[in-house]
Amino acid sequence: DAMVIQNPRYQVTQFGKPVTLSCSQTLNHNVMYWYQQKSSQAPKLLFHYYDKDFNNEADTPDNFQSRRPNTSFCFLDIRSPGLGDAAMYLCATSRDTGAQPQHFGDGTRLSIL
Amino acid sequence: GQNIDQPTEMTATEGAIVQINCTYQTSGFNGLFWYQQHAGEAPTFLSYNVLDGLEEKGRFSSFLSRSKGYSYLLLKELQMKDSASYLCAVRALTGANNLFFGTGTRLTVIP
């Protein structure tokens, strides 16, 4: 059974039109992460939540925001998508901030028209 | 800064053994992970090393040398389904469990 679920698997949006990607988890993990992965590149951490505490990476563009209304759900909002934002977006969770593996969802592939 | 290097591509024969190397230079070190990622799918956790030495898990083993900033993933008895990208990721001391990923090694297993 999938434990980190991302919807939708594929998302198409128009240039400049806001889009929201969602992630849910059944693991009851404290930490949720959002990564951006472009073709043939490493996943790049955008931000993470430890419980309700939001931690933004220094080089994450302001165009990217996140919400975590409860333990199970986390959203990635892209306010004005540009062509350069086309990528796979991966959600991951970990139980805590110790040295534990992160569990990834299947990702949402975002295309920009 | 963080720098993680892996070979871009490797090819190996079904039934053989392959070793995928990873070297890293990071601001502090707090563990190294190996993930497998099939095309279009999520990375899945394979192994974790924080102390020097070899960790074995079935057909997969991972080795770490902290003094050399070096790790390898060893895959034995290769199967066609092992064709995937293998990502080396280092957990640095900065940030909460932040992982810094290499670009991955794309392994192709041929009959």
Image (cartoon, coloured by chain):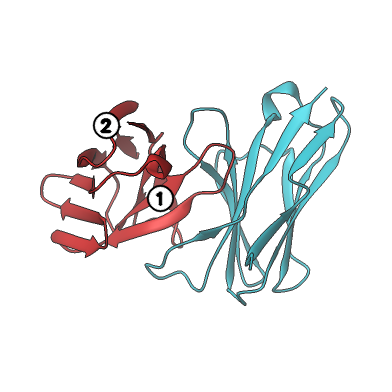
Chain colours: A cyan, B red
Badge 2 amino acid: Ala
Apparent side of residue A56 relative to residue A40 in the rendered image (left or right): right
The reply to whether dot 2 and dot 1 touch (C-beta < 8 Å) is: no
- What secondary structure is found at the residue carrying circle 2? strand
Residue A110 lies in quadrant: top right
Image coordinates of residue B57 in percent, x first then y, are: 27, 63
Question: Which numbered marker is on residue B35?
Answer: 1
Residue under the point 81% across and 47% down: A20
Quadrant occupied by the C terminus of chain A: top right
Apparent side of residue A102 relative to residue A92 in the rendered image (left or right): left
Image coordinates of residue B42 in percent, x first then y, are: 55, 48
Instruction: Determine whether B68 is above or below B11 in the image.
Output: below
The numbered mark 2 sits on a residue in which chain? B
Question: Which numbered marker is on residue A96?
Answer: none
- What secondary structure is found at the residue carrying circle 1? strand
Image coordinates of residue B21 in percent, x first then y, are: 22, 38
Question: Which numbered marker is on residue B12?
Answer: 2
Badge 1 amino acid: Tyr
Residue under the point 61% across and 48% down: A90
Residue B29 lies in quadrant: bottom left
The numbered mark 1 sits on a residue in which chain? B
Instruction: Determine whether A58 is above or below A103 in the image.
Output: above
